[in-house]
Amino acid sequence: MVGTGWPGATHVPTSVNPAAWFGQRSIFSVPRADRAFHPHQTRPVHGMPAVSCILDLIQLQDPSRPVRMAKELRLRASVRAARALFTITSSVRDELVSGFGVDPGAVTVLGMPVDAEVAARVASRRSAMPQGRYLLAVGRFDHHKNLPRLVEAFTASRFSRTGGELHLVGGTVAQLATVGVGVVPAGVKVLGALGPAALEDAMVGATALVQASLVEGYGLPVAEALMGRLPVTSSPVPAATEFGPAGLPTFDPRSVASISEAIDETVDLVDQGSYWTRVDRDSWAAARPTTRDLADQVLQGLERVAPGA
């Protein structure tokens, strides 16, 4: 952001979407440097010593084979151009090693913090008011989010039959149709892309958050919800399994019946007041990395990429 940084830092603004033309249109605005840090795999490929963050490999799941092949070529170019890599889960690191031939010693798994102030505010507000009867799902309306199965599972759930709702945040009705949900059933509300305040309100009022993704690099909504004491049920994304608390209800994202059963199980635990007895959120939260931890990891990784090495 403009106005933030550290001594010696230079802000170079650009109006170019970093995803446009695979990010290469930005190469002419990249200043010369002893080393560079790219916080996303979509990056200009240049000859300067660089560390890149490979957040996930979701681009390799694109339903279009030509697009998928182009994205894989871009990703391989980003990997080859980096002196070292960051990622955010061990599972992505393992795929980089096995599928891209990356040296395991060149990959650092970064700790993923959440906004502690927002989480504390959500938790405080949830404790002071009754919750609504709706499930919350947050994320872009992409194919890997598995929304058709989630909607079908919700409509089959006891929670739906007894008046519960499913609120989808992150896209429009038209975008929902492009991923396979042509008709929005009763009880499902499409809220669009919410701003921070509206999203916080949605988290405060929800019965639980459901994350039905087929694949995620991490699954940040899961961690954000748990930190805000919003119950969660999830597919086995890293935030729920690799980094999640003990006892978190999970399901098979390819099974409508499994998702529906997990929804009703989670709602029952919430209604019985036993969700947080089963899910050890407090021990998990005490061990979460902070933004300082993340900054230290990034700086240490950059220090290992010495100019000319």
Image: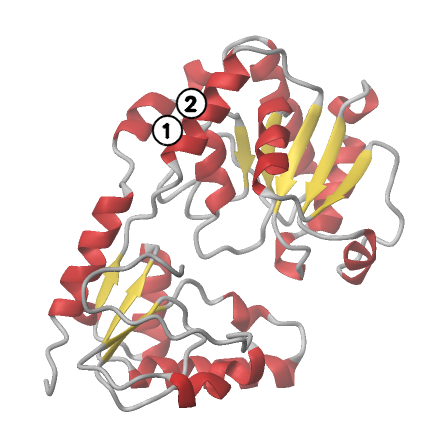
Q: Helix, strand or loop at disc 1?
A: loop
Cα gap from disc 2 to disc 1, whole angstroms? 6 Å
User: Label 1 is placed on what type of residue?
Assistant: Ala
Residue at 74 percent of width and 23 percent of height: 159
Q: Between 33 and 6, which is closer to the camera in this rendering?
A: 6
**Residue 234 sits above or below residue 24 on the image:** above
Q: Which mark is residue 254?
A: none
Position of 13 compared to 22: left or right?
left
- The residue that appears at 18% across and 68% down in the rendered structure is 302
Q: Quadrant of residue 35?
A: bottom left
Q: Quadrant of the C terminus?
A: bottom left
Residue lying at 59% horizontally and 33% vertically, measured from the top left: 209
x then y, percent, for residue 212: 61, 45
**Which SS class for mark 2?**
loop
Q: Quadrant of the N terminus?
A: bottom left
Point 52% across, 36% down: residue: 250
Q: Residues within 10 Å of mark 1 (few under 14, many from 20)?
A: some
Percent position of residue 229, x then y: 47, 23
Q: Which image quarter: residue 55? A: bottom left
Q: How far across and how far down the image is residue 65, in percent?
A: 64, 81
Kindly identify which numbered label has been placed on residue 279: 2
Q: Is there a contact, CB below 8 Å, between mark 2 and mark 1? A: yes
Residue highlighted by disc 1: 246
Q: Is residue 230 above or below residue 108?
A: above
